[in-house]
Image: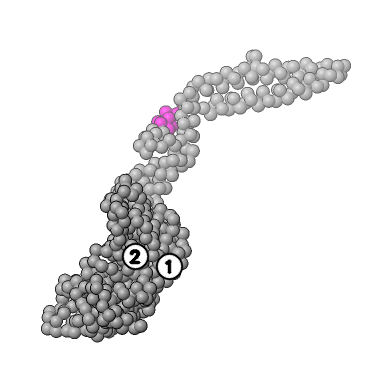
Amino acid sequence: MLKSLLIQNFVLIDNLEIDFNDKFSVITGETGAGKSIILGALALVLGQRADGKSIKLGADKCTIEAIFDIKKYELAFFFQENDLEYDPEVCIFRRELYASGKSRAFVNDSPVSLSVMKELGAYLIDIHSQHQNLLLGDIMFQLRVVDVMANNKQLLSHYHEEFLAYTRLRKERKELSDKAAQAKQEEDYIRFQAEQLEEANLYAGEQEELENEQTLLTHAEEIKTSLYKLHELLNGEEQGVVRGLKDAIALVGSIERFYPKSKQMEERLRSVYIDLDDLAADAEGQQENIEYNPERMDYVNERLNLFYSLEQKHRVSSIDELIVLLETYQKQLLAIESFDEQIEELDKQIKTQYTTVLSLAKKIHEARQQTAEQISRELVKMIAPLGMPNMRFSVELSLRKEPDMNGIDEIRFLFSANKNGLMQPVAETASGGEISRLMLCIKAMIAGSTALPSIIFDEVDTGVSGDIADKMGDIMRGLGDNMQVLAITHLPQIAAKGMSHYYVYKHDSADRTITSIRKLDQNERVSEIARMLSGATLTEASVANARDLLGI
């Protein structure tokens, strides 16, 4: 509910602050007093776009602030999603307009976009006038009315969960199908690349091995010659080092019996002899094993050229990377081959989920169908005393081809003001006054079943009077038992029904005209309603009539 409204420097308003109660309140005032200005300020603080004309002439800044109690509306999720502080008892909307043309919006002192302010405001206040009742022709509103009356909240919640699961599966299926189609287009390319790499029969380390072998084969004669010479130097027949070491060992051994230190020399020489003799034998063996093989050289060169070509083609630098690439291609081919199985499995899940969704949608349709007749009867009964005795109203439900987020129903509110008239969609045939009365009755009908936004009726009583006005006032007051209702009215019969009465008026200062509002006490209410009955001049009869309307 709207707890209070503060307006500063807005059009003809200097500084206005007013508190509201949670029942049925009325706002009255002479034509042109500024009721529409106050309503305009409220619309701005709920997110409507502004222009520079909104700011009072001569002021640099305009501020509008509205404080709400929102604990009935279960809006914690909205504040969490938009990273706003949540206080269910004090929710502050503030709008600041500047003469420069800039505008700022705040919710609980946090800056927000106008779209966020407008979305949140839609949960809190519903403004109705003869020119703002397009909502009645809105399919979503019509479905909501039926669902509230059918008590479909839990069933719809379950349906929404299942429908979202169904849409997620369909989205997953489409993405997989698109991916499969793309992969199918690339399959030939991937398969060719994979087969080429597979035919290369790659294994880790082969390139390094072959490069080493290529070097050896290229220099085979040079290596063989060097190893032969090494063997001759170490163990040749004429001047081999090994033969000389053998002679040195014998020489040192011959003096051991009279020179004991020669024993250590002999041991050292023998160690060197053994190593060099082994080295000479190894050099001779390797020299015999090394042989230039033209056929092997051709194989190694051909193999390495294949590696270099593949690496250049795939922009990699080693066989290891080619092997990783081959594994990637193989995985892609396996995935392509499995797409059909995955899609088939998803199709089964979608079919099962669709059956669940369709079953719930039909349950909702049945509940709506049963309630549709009840709504038609109650609405006709409720609206007949409001000057529409021959009105006919019907809720038409038909099945869509496919379910959507709201079920499987096509809905139309059909209306005829005359007993024999052709029933047509209400938004196409009902007049502004008829739509206003329909909306009033519909709101009254569903008010006890759901937490509705505060309602402001802006002169929806235009064109009615007497007993009809009295009955409209009764309906508004009954609405006020379940929610906050504000009615801007020119009818004394409705004004007298309010639990609180606010009066909008203009007064002149030295240089300009100012709009103000105040809450009337009982005596002031008598005078205001008497004025509404008789005009500017109060009479004893109008005052008595006003007291009678107020029941005092």
**Res. 69 mark:** 1
Q: Circle 2 is placed at which residue position?
A: 517
Q: Which portion, as a residue range, is magenta? A: 291-301
Give the residue type that dot 1 points to.
Asp
> Does residue 239 appear to the left or right of 461 in the view shown?
right
Residue contact at pointers 1 and 2, CB within 8 angstroms: no
Give the x, y percent position of residue 134: 23, 68
Where in the figure is residue 151, as x and y percent of width and height?
35, 79
What residue is rendered at 37% in x and 35% in y?
312
181, above or below 261, in the image: below
Neighbours of disc 2 within 10 Å: few (<14), some (14-19), many (20+):
many
Relative image position of residue 331 (x, y in whole percent): 40, 51
508 and 394: which one is in front? 508
Locate the N terminus and report the quarter of the image it occupies. Answer: bottom left
- Chosen colour scheme: one colour
Relative placement, left or right, of 364 versus 256 is left
Secondary element at tag 1: loop
Considering the image in quadrants, where does the C terminus appear? bottom left
**Which secondary structure type mostly characterizes the magenta part of the structure?**
helix
Q: Is residue 137 left or right of residue 170?
A: left
Q: Residue at x 41, y 63 (%)?
A: 67
Tell me if residue 431 is in the magenta stretch.
no
Quadrant housing residue 389: bottom left
- Judged by depth in the image, the label closer to the viewer, 1 or 2, is 2
Residue at horizontal 26%, vertical 81%? 541
Task: Name the outermost residue toward the top.
Answer: 239
**Residue in front for this viewpoint, 460 or 18:** 18
Q: Is residue 465 visible?
A: yes
Sequence-wise, which precedes: disc 1 or disc 2?
A: 1
341 versus 200 height, above or below: below
